[in-house]
Amino acid sequence: MVTGEPAPTSPGGPSSPRVDVGAQPPRGSGGKRLSVVVAAHNEAAVLGRTLRTLLATAAPAEFEVVVVANGCTDATAAVARSVSGVTVLELPEPGKPAALNAGDAVVATFPRIYLDADIPLPTAGARALAAAVTAPGVLAAAPRRRLDTTGRPLLVRGYYAINRRHPAYRNALFGRGAIALSAAGRDRFGPFPDVVADDLFLDTQFTEAEKREVAEVSTVVATPRRTADLLRRLGRVRAGNASLRAADDQVRRARRASWLVDVVLPRPWLLPAGVCYAGLTLLAATAARRPAVRNRWGRDESSRVPGPADADGVPGATP
């Protein structure tokens, strides 16, 4: 992980990111309705689908989109360049905070959406998120989340039967893969810090009244296809959340028994799923204490499978 300081953008310096503008019109907010920053590390399998979904019905130059390919060893940058109207930056080292800061340095438009590379957000959904943060007092917005558990093993389905109902996700910004900020919202903090839980960090910047879940917009979050991948994801998330909470006592904390009190007890038929949830959570908590887990990325690769829009001949769009 690299530091959270903004990456240099002046040309010619040894650490400057490579920038390809391609068919992008001259930068500036004139004529554009919103900007989108996508940090992408080895996302060639899914990035094409994400970008084409985002821009499918957008007017020319309506969206200012930048993809920051960071530390990639696949064709992520090539896939991004194949989509007209997308600015591509390349950073030599992997690290999402540095990629977000580099993207912030080259876009000018607000509202601004931070979009995960594996989250398809339709054009209309992006517009609705941007519109939400223009309402008085609203500084941040996120879509509803829909969890895809199709074909997942029993333990994974059991875990997410509880997770999808957990009250910690009510009116939260995390866990959706897309967060929109107004200019005033982005002014709430400086560079993205060097943390794993960037969405939880953003969530802590705003009060309940300043955040809005946009009910008419939803993102599909692919769940891990194997139980081992779920445990790796949970270990990374717990380690990242614990690190952020240790540095900032204002970070929201979930009630430890909330899964039982708020989810299972009112729905006794979920007790078997609750056992799955509790067991996997305990295993992940134990793993998160190990330095090897805290210091590695732990990304779930099993859910990153190409969709129809990624199988259209774009170099690197399929594994």
Image: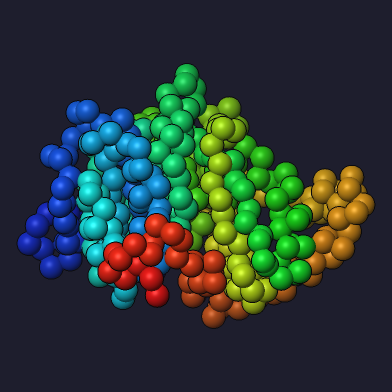
The residue located at (32%, 36%) in the rendering is 58
User: Does residue 192 sit above or below 272 in this rendering?
Assistant: above
**Frontmost residue, 241 versus 128:** 128
271 left or right of 306? right
Where residue 277 appears, x then y in whole percent? 77, 63
Residue occupying the point 34% across, 43% down: 55
Which residue, as the protein is rendered here, is positioned at the far bottom? 292
What residue do we see at 40% from left, 47% from top?
53
Outermost residue on the top side: it is 136
The answer to whether any part of residue 96 appears in the image is no
- Decide which of 53, 180 is in the foreground and name it: 53
Name the spot of residue 85 as percent of width and height, x first. 22, 46
Check the picture and name the quadrant holding the C terminus: bottom left
Residue 183 on image: x %, y %: 35, 31
Please state, as top left, top right, bottom left or bottom right, where the N terminus lies in the image: bottom left
In this rendering, is residue 255 above or below 29? below
Across and down, in percent, residue 302 comes to 54, 72
Residue at the spot x=27%, y=40% of the render?
64
275 displayed left or right of 191:
right
